Amino acid sequence: MRPSGLLIALLCALALPGAALAFGLATPGPLLAAAGALLGASLIDLARLRVSPTPELERRVPRVVAVGHALNVELALQGSPQRLDVFDLHPADWRVEDMPQRLQVPASGRIVISYRLHPQQRGSARFEGCALRLHSPWRLWTQARRVEAQNTVRVYPDFARVSHLALVGTDRASRVIGAHQHRRRGEGTEFHQLREYRTGDSLRQIDWKATQRARKLISRDYQDERNQQVMLLLDTGRRMLAHDGSLSHFDHALNASLLVAFIALRQGDSVGLLASGGESRWMPPVRGLGAIDRMLDTVFDLQPQPVATDYIEAAVQLGARQQRRALVLIITNARDEDIEDLLAGVRQLQRRHLVCVASLREGILDTLMESAPESVDAALETSAAAHYLEQRQRAHHALRAQGTSVLDVSAAQLPGALVDHYLAMKRAGRL
């Protein structure tokens, strides 16, 4: 319970005639009457505030949201007509708009307000309650109260793009992501249909029995083989703590993994996931678009840790759990100092699987190499970036020398590069 600014101002106003009374310039009667009236009013107002009921509150917030996307939160308050300040106890590290708010509960006793939040990090987030500051009827006192209204929100990787892609065809979806592969009819490994011969068809596509029956050339049409398997191996170690924009490299890797998983599932393939390095997670290969929900539940609260990634251990874990041949997409940041372990882990996986290493490159490196240094410090930064990129190239060359596909990409390029590689390997029949 605290005096309001108005009560403090009235007390200060009484101090002036009090000073005059001290110097014998005024009579005490009017001053005592005014002080008594103010004291009586403040006590009555204080009592009315103390007995005033705390408004009931209901918070309406989605149970699941995507990181980086704003969400609206509604607060419905029910109580007696009164003036109050509202501050919702939302997750502290989220950016907020339109909070706190001052409002007047109308005569109907119900009011609904809203504000916007911007989730900054994946995982489970809690709303612990709501802080209220009630104003007394005559505005002489305020009282802080708390309403216990708890909600838990799951912040998932950015599934908004996947939701958008679900509304378009697979070929268009791959173009939206940034992939440049296009389906060429007649190629693939699984029979699709019979059709009339077209100029350019190879002789081995001709179905001679069907040709004899139809008395015209008939070709077999093939499509990409279905029910193959794609494994996403995500690095959760210190290399993925780097940021590009507002998201860490690990968040970019998760978002790209969702997109390539969606394309693979639309193609009829199975998708699984292993996260290793810091905290480990495992999702066995699953078919059907419901696998996206399962993947989101598996990784939504997974965070990279400031530890070195043991690529050999990751290869052993994946080899023990994934017996069937699969396309293994390793998403990491290959460094020269880690190359021996990475080479050993990849060699172990290559005994059974088709392996691709997607090596994330920090966006600041491209910026430094494209700009002309204008000072000694800038020149030193550019030189250090060039040396670092040279080390990366050596690591990538060592991987390619043992037959591993390497994608040297920025965070923005990662989704398109992964989808491109997946479609290329599938259409080449290498899975």
Image (cartoon, rainbow, N blue to C red):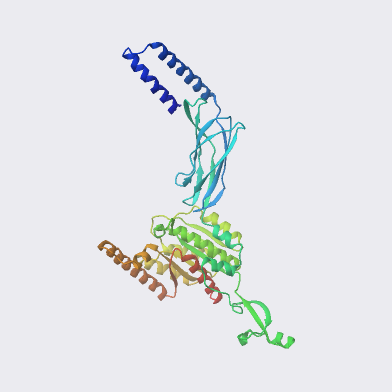
Give residue 54's position: percent from left, percent from top: 55, 30
Q: Residue at the location (54% across, 72% down)?
A: 423
Nearer-the-camera pick, 62 or 293: 62
Q: Residue at the location (43% across, 28% down)?
A: 5
- In the image, is 169 to the left or to the right of 252? right
**Residue 67 versus residue 323 in the image, above or below:** above
Give residue 99's position: percent from left, percent from top: 49, 41
Dividing the picture into quarters, in which one does residue 80 lie? top right
Q: Residue furthest left?
A: 376
**Residue 350 versus residue 24 in the image, above or below:** below
**Residue 103 versus residue 24 in the image, above or below:** below
- In the image, is 342 to the left or to the right of 273? left
Q: Residue furthest front?
A: 25
Q: Residue at the location (54% across, 24% down)?
A: 51
Q: Is any part of residue 351 visible from this angle? A: yes
**Residue 20 versus residue 288 in the image, above or below:** above
- For the C terminus, the image quarter is bottom right
- In the image, is 314 to the left or to the right of 168? left
Give residue 140's position: percent from left, percent from top: 47, 25
Dividing the picture into quarters, in which one does residue 402 lie? bottom left
